[in-house]
Amino acid sequence: MRLSTVALSLATAGTLVAAQPHRHHHRHADRHNAAKRAPAPVLIEAGWVTVTTVTVTQTPGAAAPSVHPTEAPKPNIEAASVADTSPAAPSSSAPAKSDSAPKSDAAPQAGSGSGSGSGSAGSYTGVDKDFPDGQIDCSHFPSDYGAVAVDWAGLGGWSGTQDVGNNYANGKAGDKCKDNTMCSYSCPPGYLKTQWPKDQPASGASVGGLKCEGGKLKLTNPSLSTKLCMKGVGGISVSNKVGKGVAVCRTDYPGNEAQTVPATYDINASSYELGTPDQKGYFFWKGSQTSAQYYINAAGVPIEEGCQWNVEASNKGNFAPINIGASQDNGLRWLSIHPTEYFKSELGFNIRIKGDSVSDECYYEHPKICQGGNCKTLGEKGCGCTVSSKGDATYEFY
């Protein structure tokens, strides 16, 4: 197994763009045995490309991937780790290029066509309410405080669970949020989870959510927020012109890192805002800033099937062919399109980034991902671009 970083010079020196592939590792070695290779992340920074290659081990149907670098396990490829080698970089800080619980009637079911597709709190209940720390039973999924149930995960609405006393082992369908367990959750479109413990496992695995302690749900990051969900910085959205619904699924990070968090719960939404973190105000992995990563399923795949850890033959979830990234840092919004290992499975539609003064062309037209109109420069390695934080950008599916 290996973790390597290679710096390459690009012909277009001075162009400031950033590819943000799914750049986080997760280690649960005892649960995975079939070796797979993760996509090679590409960070493009003012004429320099940094390529990081990792080897992933996973078992089809398992709850989350596992990566075994040569040295200490570094679980989250979302974490930025690029030296500032370019004079055109905005600052010396390199951006990441990267169970039968009651539910509120107002919380829509994924794929049902209900709920807000615009990124506002809309019909989601309690998103602006402070969570009553240590007062809610662990058997109660907190949809009345903004969390949105991910029922298809089979965890009582939770997007993932991690057993603190068992090396943070990931829960499986049928498990519940119980004592000494981290219980993670999804938020409305355009919103981000606020809870994760600042003290993360020494193994390098990421952990997130509320903690069930003494039968009650406890906040794990009240210094960030006493609400369960917070609005992302906005400015990055999806426009679907395919004519069919597309399941766009974010990794539950920090957490079990499975693709269980839908970008929207309305499969037929034509446009909606992506939950986009401000890198300096969100989760840091070992001091490194992180970004949001979304897997793009083929048109017509239901959210319930696309937004979960899947098996290879499915071409869904973690086996979907394309990944996109979203974050903000140093006055710029960072976007990217990147192939997963399973890029050979055709998505069935194209993706391009459009927006206010986009720094460079970045688009996917099967079987190529193209940078600056040149599909040979990066080939199947991914592409990225930026827009000012005062502007807007859109991933257009067409």
Image (cartoon, rainbow, N blue to C red):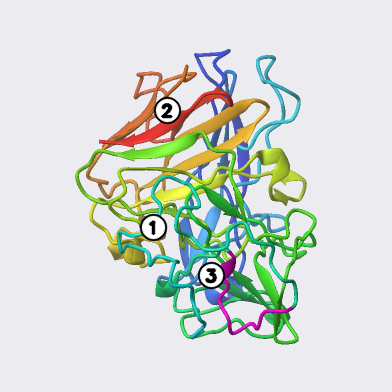
Q: Residues within 10 Å of mark 2 (few under 14, many from 20)?
A: some
Q: CA distance from mark 3 to mark 2?
A: 43 Å
Q: Which secondary structure type mostly characterizes the magenta part of the structure?
A: loop
Question: Could you say whether the residue bearing mark 1 is in a helix, strand or loop?
Answer: loop
Q: Amino acid at mark 1?
A: Gly
On the rendered structure, is 396 left or right of 198? Answer: left
- What residue does disc 2 label? 378
Q: Which mark is residue 115?
A: 1
Residue interval drawn in magenta: 135-145
Q: Image height check: is 124 above or below 16?
A: below
Q: Amino acid at mark 3?
A: Ser
Q: CA distance from mark 1 to mark 3?
A: 13 Å
Where residue 98 appears, x then y in whole percent?
57, 38
Where residue 83 appears, x then y in whole percent?
72, 30
Instruction: First in sequence, mark 3 or 2: give its number.
Output: 3
Q: Which mark is residue 143?
A: 3
